C-alpha cells in the first residue's frame, strides 16, 4: 500500500499539520498527511475564531506567504472585527468569528484539491530512523511508511489526559483517544520533554439562553477580511453577546475547588497565563467581583454556543450550577461540560530556526508540540516547517524570517532562543519592530520572499506589486499637490487643528494627527484622483499609514539595520563556549545548550548578558 517513498510525511491534521502539508505539496513535494481522524482536519478544538491581538497579524502573514488559513477564515467567517482601531496601525488586529463546521470542511476540501497530498487515517506510533536521520513513520497497525522528512504536529494528543473534576481519562480532545509511543521513543533518543495544560469552556444550547439580558457585540459596520486574494467579504454577520460573572457565581464555583484538579494536585503542569480558567481567575484576582463572558455562536445554522471566558476543569455539576447563575444563562442546557487537558511537549530550544530538530536530521516539530498555544501560532509553524522540509530535501537555502520581517519570525526566534515553560502565545508587545510588522503590509513584506522560494503564486505577487505601485502613486500625489487655505481650513477648523495661512503641500497637512483620509477625500482634487485611478480602501489605507507614520517607520528600520550587523556575525557550529573563561557560568551553560547561529541570536537568550556578548564579539574578531 505504501510502496513509494514520500518526500514529506506530516503527522497530525490540525492547524499546524494542515498548513505544513499544503506548503510542502504546493512547493512540489510528494506529501502524506497522516492523522487519527480525517473528519477532524482543521478542527477548531477550542474557540470558534481566528485572529485577535497579534494573532490576526500572523494569519495575514500566513496568507501573504501563500498559506491557506486566511482563505479558509474568510470562507467560513460569520463576523469580522478589526480590534484596537482606536490605536495606531501597529496595533490593529483583525479577528473573525468562524463557523466551526464550515471551517473544518473548507480545510478538508482545500487539501483534497491540492495536488501532491495523500491522506491516511491511523495513529502514528513511532519514527523510522537510520542513524540520526528520520526515514519514515510506523503506524499502530505496524505499517512502515517511508519518507525523506517528517513533520510532527501532534497538538494536545501526545499522552493526552482529560480532567473534569475528580474524573480523568486519556484523550487528545473530547471524544478522541490520545496518541502514544512517540514521546517515549523521542525521550529514549535524548529529547527533553515536559507536560503542559490547556482548557476549554462548556458548550451550551443557544435556545436555552436569554440574549435580551446580555450586551450585544456586533461586527464591524464595514467588515474587512484576512486574505489578500478575492475571498468573499461578509454581507451579513451574526451577533456575539457579552455577560458577566458575579460574586454569587464565584461563590458557587468555589464550592467545587476541593474537587478541582487544578487545586488538589491532580494537574501538575502549567496552563496558558493569558487564557486562565475561570477558577484560576477567581483565585488570582480575588478582588474582582465579576469577569466578562463572551457568548459566541459556533456557526450560521447551529444552536451550539461557546462560552468564552468560562474555561474550566471543575466538576460538571459545579459548572452547571454556577453557569445557571449568570445573567441570561438561568435556563442553560449543556451540550458538554468544560475540561482541562494535559499533554506532552518538547522544549523548543531543541530546534533550529527552520524547526528541524537538532538531534534528528529531517525531523521537524510544529505547533503545540513546541509549547505554543493558539491556532494561529500553530498554523504559522506548520507553514514554516513544511517550507523548510521541502527546501532541505531539494538542497536549497533554508527559509528563516527575521524579527523585523514578520511576527512569525519573532515567534520562532522566541521559541528557539528563550524556550517556554508555559504555553506561549504571541502579543504585539513581543515584537520590538511592530510598526514595521503591521497587518496591512504583510503582503508587501512577505509575498516577494515566498514567490522567490516557489510557494506564493505569480498572481499573488502581481496583486501585491500593483497594490504597492498604486499606494506609492497616491503618496506621490499628496507630496506634489498643493491645497489652498479656502479649501482646507474648514476641515482643519472642524478637527481643532491650526489653520493654514497660505497654500501648502497636501502631504504636510495630511501628516497632522487629527486629519484622516476621509477628511482629505472631501477635497475635490483628492476624490477625483481616487475615482480616476479606481483606488480601493486597502491602497488608500496603505498610503495614509505611509504618510502619517513615516518617521516611526524610518526609525524602526534604522534600529533593525543595527540588529542585522550582529546577525552577520556568525558563530561556528562546533564552537566551544567552555574555553571562554570570561563568559559567565550561566551564559556558557545556555549557549552550549541552545547553540545560537549568530551573535544577534545569542544576545536574545535569557541569561546571556551584554558583557557576555562583548566577550563573544571580541573573540569572533568583531
Image: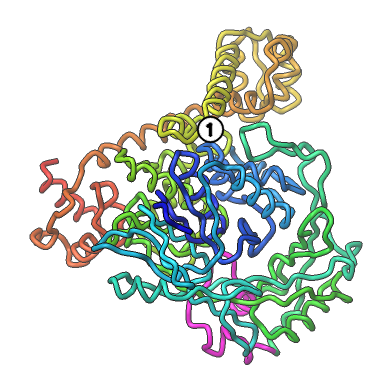
Identified at 66% across, 9% down, the residue is 483
Residue 368 in the image, given as x and y percentages of width and height: 49, 63
Where residue 62 sits in the image (x, y, percent)? Answer: 53, 43
Residue at 73% over, 47% down:
77
Q: Is residue 127 found inside the magenta-colored segment of the image?
A: no
Name the side, left or right, on which 582 lies relative to 552: left
In-image side of 558 versus 501 (left or right) = left
* Residue 563 appears anywhere in the view: no
Q: Is residue 527 above or below residue 423?
A: above
Does the magenta stretch mainly form a helix, a strand or a loop? loop
Q: Is residue 277 magenta?
A: yes
Q: Quadrant of residue 229?
A: top right
In the rendered picture of this protein, how many numbered marks are placed on residues?
A: 1
Q: Which residues are magenta?
A: 256-285
Q: Can the viewer see residue 348? A: yes
Q: Position of residue 69 (x, y in %)?
A: 59, 46
- The structure residue drawn at horizontal position 61% and vertical position 43%, both measured from the top left corner, is 113
Relative depth, front residue between 122 and 568 = 122
In the image, residue 141 above or below residue 56: below
Q: Quadrant of the C terminus?
A: top left
Q: Is residue 194 left or right of residue 428?
A: left
Measuring from the top left, give residue 173's x and y in whole percent.
61, 71
Q: Which is nearer the eye, 104 or 428?
A: 104
Q: Quadrant of residue 48?
A: bottom right
Q: Quadrant of residue 188?
A: bottom left
Disc 1 marks which residue? 443
Q: Secondary structure at mark 1?
A: helix
Task: Examine the rendered structure and indicate whether residue 190 appears above or below residue 461.
Answer: below
Name the colouring of the figure: rainbow
Packing grade of label 1 (10 A; few <14, some 14-19, many >=20) is many
Instruction: Tell whether 573 sits left or right of 547.
Output: left
Amino acid at each position: 500500500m505504501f510502496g513509494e517513498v514520500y518526500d514529506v510525511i506530516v503527522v497530525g491534521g490540525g492547524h499546524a499539520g494542515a498548513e505544513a502539508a499544503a506548503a510542502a505539496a504546493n512547493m512540489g513535494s510528494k506529501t502524506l498527511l497522516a492523522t487519527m481522524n480525517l473528519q477532524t482536519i482543521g478542527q477548531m478544538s477550542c474557540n470558534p475564531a481566528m485572529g485577535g491581538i497579534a494573532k490576526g497579524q500572523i494569519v495575514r502573514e500566513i496568507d501573504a506567504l501563500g498559506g491557506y488559513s486566511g482563505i479558509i477564515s474568510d470562507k467560513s467567517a460569520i463576523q469580522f472585527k478589526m480590534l484596537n482601531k482606536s490605536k495606531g496601525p501597529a496595533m490593529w488586529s483583525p479577528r473573525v468569528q468562524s463557523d466551526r463546521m464550515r471551517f473544518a470542511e473548507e480545510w478538508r476540501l482545500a487539501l483534497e484539491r491540492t495536488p501532491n497530498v495523500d491522506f491516511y487515517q491511523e495513529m502514528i506510533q513511532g519514527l523510522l530512523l537510520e542513524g540520526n536521520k528520520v526515514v519514515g513513520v510506523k503506524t499502530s497497525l505496524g505499517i512502515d511508511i517511508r519518507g525523506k522528512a517528517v513533520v510532527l504536529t501532534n497538538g494536545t494528543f501526545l499522552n493526552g489526559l482529560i480532567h473534569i473534576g475528580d474524573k480523568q481519562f486519556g484523550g487528545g480532545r473530547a471524544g478522541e483517544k490520545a496518541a502514544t509511543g512517540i514521546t517515549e521513543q523521542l525521550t529514549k533518543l535524548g529529547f527533553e520533554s515536559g507536560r503542559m495544560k490547556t482548557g476549554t469552556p462548556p458548550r451550551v444550547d443557544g435556545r436555552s439562553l436569554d440574549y435580551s439580558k446580555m450586551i450585544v457585540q456586533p461586527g464591524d459596520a464595514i467588515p474587512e477580511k484576512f486574505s489578500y486574494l478575492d475571498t468573499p467579504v461578509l454581507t451579513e454577520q451574526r451577533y456575539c453577546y457579552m455577560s458577566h460573572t458575579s460574586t454569587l457565581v464565584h461563590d458557587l464555583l468555589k464550592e467545587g475547588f476541593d474537587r478541582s484538579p487544578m487545586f488538589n494536585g491532580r494537574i501538575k503542569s502549567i496552563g496558558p497565563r493569558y487564557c486562565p480558567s475561570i477558577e484560576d481567575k477567581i483565585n488570582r484576582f480575588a478582588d474582582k467581583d465579576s469577569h466578562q463572558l463572551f457568548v459566541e455562536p459556533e456557526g450560521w445554522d447551529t444552536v451550539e454556543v461557546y462560552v468564552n471566558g468560562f474555561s474550566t476543569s471543575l466538576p460538571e455539576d459545579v459548572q452547571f450550577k454556577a453557569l445557571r447563575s449568570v445573567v441570561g444563562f438561568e435556563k442553560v442546557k449543556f451540550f458538554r461540560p468544560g475540561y482541562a487537558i494535559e499533554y506532552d511537549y518538547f522544549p523548543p530550544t531543541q530546534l533550529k530556526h527552520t524547526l528541524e530538530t537538532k538531534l534528528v536530521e529531517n525531523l521537524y516539530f510544529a505547533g503545540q508540540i513546541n509549547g505554543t498555544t493558539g491556532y494561529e501560532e500553530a498554523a504559522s509553524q506548520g507553514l514554516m516547517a513544511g517550507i523548510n522540509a521541502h527546501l532541505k530535501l531539494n538542497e536549497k537555502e533554508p527559509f528563516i524570517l527575521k524579527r523585523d520581517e514578520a511576527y512569525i519570525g519573532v515567534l520562532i526566534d522566541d521559541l528557539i532562543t528563550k524556550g517556554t515553560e508555559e504555553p506561549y502565545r504571541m502579543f504585539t508587545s513581543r515584537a520590538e519592530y511592530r510598526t514595521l510588522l503591521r497587518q496591512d503590509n504583510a503582503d508587501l513584506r512577505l509575498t516577494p520572499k515566498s514567490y522567490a522560494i516557489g510557494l506564493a503564486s505569480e498572481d499573488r505577487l502581481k496583486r501585491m506589486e500593483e497594490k504597492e505601485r498604486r499606494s506609492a502613486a497616491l503618496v506621490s500625489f499628496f507630496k506634489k499637490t498643493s491645497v489652498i487655505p479656502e479649501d482646507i481650513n474648514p476641515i482643519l477648523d472642524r478637527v481643532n487643528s491650526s489653520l493654514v495661512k497660505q497654500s501648502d503641500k497636501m502631504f504636510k497637512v495630511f501628516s497632522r494627527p487629527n486629519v484622516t483620509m476621509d477628511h482629505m477625500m472631501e477635497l475635490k482634487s483628492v476624490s477625483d484622483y481616487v475615482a480616476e485611478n479606481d483606488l480601493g480602501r486597502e491602497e488608500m489605507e496603505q498610503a495614509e499609514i505611509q504618510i502619517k507614520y513615516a518617521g516611526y517607520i524610518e526609525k524602526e528600520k534604522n534600529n533593525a539595520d543595527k540588529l542585522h550587523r550582529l546577525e552577520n556575525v556568525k558563530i561556528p557550529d562546533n564552537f566551544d563556549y567552555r574555553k571562554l573563561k570570561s563568559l559567565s557560568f550561566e551564559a556558557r551553560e545556555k549557549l552550549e545548550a541552545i547553540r545560537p547561529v549568530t551573535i544577534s541570536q545569542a544576545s536574545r537568550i535569557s541569561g546571556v548578558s551584554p558583557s557576555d556578548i562583548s566577550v563573544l564579539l571580541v573573540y569572533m574578531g568583531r
